Image (cartoon, helix red, strand yellow):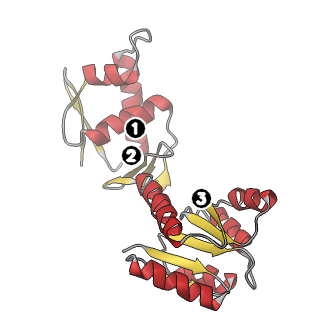
Amino acid sequence: MNKILLLEDDTLFAETLVDLLEEDGFEVNHFPNGQDALDATFTSKFDAYLLDINVPLIDGLSLLHELRGADDNTPAIFLTSHKSKDMLENGFLSGGDDYMTKPFDADELILRLKAVLKRSKKSEPKLLGKLSHNELHKTIYHDGNELDLSKKEYELLMIFMSHVDKVVTKELIYEELWSSSEGGSDGAIRVYINRLKQLLPDMKIENIRGVGYRLVS
């Protein structure tokens, strides 16, 4: 069940949205002002934010701007009566994923919410022990910290993560890392392997003599 944070100061409208979303299987936490909503993000993890803009204490734009500044990438849709292009631009600049102008069709809201949730799940890190991969941003993390990888190092580690506990042949590495015109070498592979070993001291990359390498889970 996806957990939704709803920021809306119109009580009757909020109750309507809560009923609509809960009927569709969502869990909804409603907050009438931006400060309460912000406080809730410190103690709970949400799958998506539905944010009105003109609300008390902290407006929706400022709230999302602050969350994005704290590396909170939870998908967010603005729900507002504003129709100006400037406000629309401000919504996206603040980190919004979508924008709906009141009044809006309830079915369209559900469709858009499911769409942003689907996109965000595609970018969730794939896990392998302490390693995780964010496919959308082409980044790999070790124990929650982003690894500083060159393009070739990233590609090589991705091969190992896709073939964990299996032998990765040198031929496969050549095919994946270099085009026919680039011409890789055993020496270059060893340099990249040693670099990965330095970055991942708690993980074992075995040298299978004459054949290739293996990342041990």
Q: Are marks 1 and 3 in contact (CB under 8 Å)?
A: no
Residue nearest the viewer, comparing 13 with 49? 13
Q: Earlier in the sequence, mark 2 or mark 3?
A: 3
Position of the N terminus by quadrant: bottom left
Disc 2 is placed on an element classified as: loop
Q: Position of residue 89 (x, y in %)?
A: 75, 56
Task: Count the numbered circles shown.
Answer: 3
Between the residue at mark 2 and the residue at mark 1, the CA separation in whole angstroms equals 6 Å
**Quadrant of the rendered image containing residue 33:** bottom right
Q: Amino acid at mark 3?
A: Asp
Q: Position of residue 112 (x, y in %)?
A: 51, 62
Which residue has dot 3 on it? 97
User: Can residue 13 be spotted in the picture?
Assistant: yes
Q: Residue at x 36, y 31 (%)?
A: 193
Residue nearest the viewer, comparing 160 with 1? 1
Residue 173 appears left or right of 192: left
**Quadrant of the rendered image containing residue 210:** top left
Q: Residue at x 78, y 62 (%)?
A: 87
Residue nearest the viewer, comparing 196 with 128? 128
Q: Position of residue 76 (x, y in %)?
A: 58, 65
Which residue has dot 2 on it? 200
Between the residue at mark 1 and the residue at mark 3, the CA separation in whole angstroms equals 35 Å
Q: Are marks 2 and 1 in contact (CB under 8 Å)?
A: yes
Q: Amino acid at mark 1?
A: Leu
